Amino acid sequence: MSAPRVYVDFDDVLCETAREFTRVLAAQFGKRVAFEEIVSFDLGRSFGLPPEGLARLMRAVHEPAVLRRMAPVPGALEALGRWAAAGLEIWVVTGRPLHTRAASLQWLEEHRVPFAALEFVDKYAREPPGAPGAAPRPLAELAALDFALAVEDAPQMVRFLAERTRAPVAVLRRPWNAALGLAPPAAARVVRCADWPDLLRRFPRPGAADDGRKENRTC
């Protein structure tokens, strides 16, 4: 019997991506936006950037040196270590561009993340066509995978996972995911968590009968 798998998003779940975005925004655009002011997952809207400005920002934040210096989200590494020690497989599932694979792997290895797989998925339909065999996994394929738990922050992905998979979805509280727009029965699979220690308290062993679904909050 295979080990239970846990889906863990990368940006703003494992590492402090949005906070790094604000530093790059200040340095390269002279714009200061507090983390708490990022109330939309549409970064052009949150940062007040036109399409060409947003494209420039995205190129800058996906530079290897920028990706590698992102700090871990507090409590994330400890929680993943606990789950891995309990026999769970950690799948890091990211919507980053494929060209960031080397830098992403280096970050995981440098921080000793106990991951079994790093999956690049076209979460937001923004990956340009690449060479044959170099495409990210299509989003629809996630629905066929069996996860004991999914940990996400992006509203679009929370909705997809809650509506298209059977996994409970732990949502780390972020300014941009205050409203998810989910209705029953999908909403019943979503558990809002204040931070990683709260998440680990609710899901000490994902897949167990006493997981955190009974503590669901309003979606």
Image: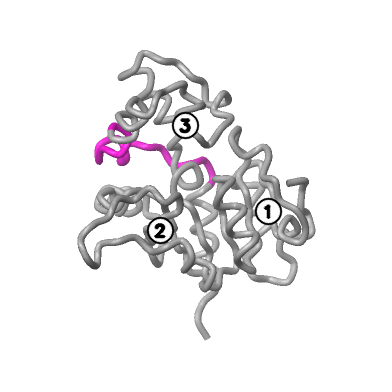
Left or right of residue 4, residue 192 in this image: right
* Region rendered in magenta: 60-75
Look at label 2 and name its amino acid.
Val
Residue 69 within the magenta-colored segment of the rendering: yes
**1 vs 2, front mark:** 2
Q: Amino acid at mark 1?
A: Arg
| Between discs 1 and 3, the one toward the N terminus | 3
Give the SS element for disc 1.
helix
Residue under the point 56% across and 23% down: 37
Residue 61, by quadrant, is top left
Query: Is 39 within the magenta?
Result: no
Ranked by sequence position, the earlier of labels 2 and 3 is 3
Residue at the top extreme, as displayed = 30
CB contact under 8 Å: marks 2 and 3: no
Q: Is residue 48 left or right of residue 65?
A: right
Residue at 60% across, 52% down: 158
49 to 117, vertically: above or below: above
Please say if the residues under marks 1 and 3 sit with CB atoms less than 8 Å apart.
Answer: no
Q: Which mark is residue 201?
A: 1
Identify residue for label 3. 43
Q: Position of residue 140 (x, y in %)?
A: 48, 65
Disc 3 element: helix
Q: Position of residue 31 (x, y in %)?
A: 41, 15
- Work out which residue is located at the far left of the displayed protein and give it: 131
Q: Residues within 10 Å of mark 1 (few under 14, many from 20)?
A: few
List the residue tagged with mark 2.
121
Query: How many angstroms separate mark 1 from mark 2 (CA)?
Result: 28 Å
> What is the spatial separation of the Cα atoms under label 1 and label 3, in whole angstroms?
31 Å
Q: Nearer the viewer, mark 1 or mark 3?
A: 3
Image x and y of residue 194, in percent:
66, 41
Depth check, front residue: 172 or 156: 156
| Residue in the picture at 37% in, 37% down | 70
